[in-house]
Image (spheres, grey):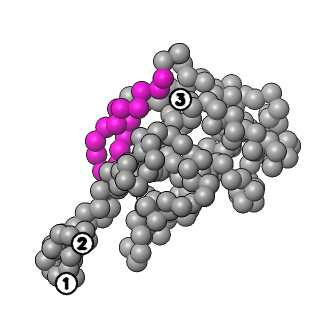
Amino acid sequence: MSISMEWAMSLLLNNPQSINKIKAEIDANVPEDRLLDEQDLPKLKYLPNVITETLRLYPPVPFLIPHQASENCTVGGYDISKGTMLLVNLWAMHRDPRLWEKPTEFIPERHELKKEEEYMLPFGAGRRKCPGGGIANRVLELTLGTLIQAFEWERVSEEMVDMTEGTGFSIPKVKALEAICKPRDNTIKHSLVLS
């Protein structure tokens, strides 16, 4: 989840209008005397779209867990023999221009209508879907939302945050995110005390 959080914050720093939308949404739905809580999440509509769009562009794993064909079949015009190992390339599917308009751009609003949800598979699908996907989304929403509620964020320079992708089981950033954060004036500072 830390990699997903780093991607989300990187995308937001390159798209400050999205940070402002999240701030406004949280400020309108969460009392000023406390930090964002799980009970607030159903009231927030834009923040989950930011998480979904982040996971579309940078899925937790670029390939789903391999599956073995249980019988001979045809998929997309290709004959698949029983026993063949199959991989779903989520990274490519989530950036496929046949499925997504402007597929390489960060557009959280695309998820408002949920019309492409059948193509959004960051945690897999069906019987083998990751059982922790729902929890991961909630933790990402709470963490990112709280960071934006509590702090003003900006890039360390005028240059855009480097979005070069590394390789591995998950897709890390090649260059670690560096950002400047300052407590927001309207945040109850005693709420930020860490145990």
Q: Mark 3: few, some, or many residues within 10 Å (few <14, many ≥20)?
A: some
Q: Do the residues labelled 3 and 2 touch (CB within 8 Å)?
A: no
* Residue 1 is covered by the magenta coloring: no
Taking depth in this image into account, of 146 and 155 the one nearest to the observer is: 155
The residue depicted at 60 percent of the width and 47 percent of the height is 109
Q: How far apart are marks 1 and 3 (CA)?
A: 46 Å
Q: Residue at x 42, y 45 (%)?
A: 103
Given the image, on which type of amino acid does mark 3 rest? Asn
Please give the residue where the numbered disc 3 appears in the rendered image.
14
Report helix, strand or loop for mark 1.
loop
- For the residues labelled 2 and 1, the Cα–Cα distance comes to 12 Å
Q: Mark 1 points at which residue?
A: 71
Q: What residue type is labelled 2?
A: Val
Q: Please name whichever residue, 99 or 88, is drawn nearer the observer in this view of the structure.
A: 99
Q: Which of marks 3 and 2 is nearer the N terminus?
A: 3
- The residues tagged by marks 3 and 2 sit, at their Cα atoms, a distance apart of 39 Å
Residue type highlighted by circle 1: Glu
Q: Position of residue 138 (x, y in %)?
A: 60, 57
Q: Does the magenta stretch include residue 169?
A: yes
Give the number of the disc on residue 75: 2
Most frequent secondary structure within the magenta stretch: loop
Quarter of the C terminus within the rendering: top right
Q: Which secondary structure, mark 3?
A: helix
Residue stretch rendered in magenta on the structure: 160-174
Compared across the picture, whether 117 is left or right of 93 comes to right
**The one of 120 and 152 positioned closer to us in this rendering:** 120
Residue at 81 percent across and 49 percent down: it is: 29
The numbered mark, 1 or 3, whose residue comes first in the sequence reads 3
Q: Report x, y in % for residue 173.
A: 38, 36
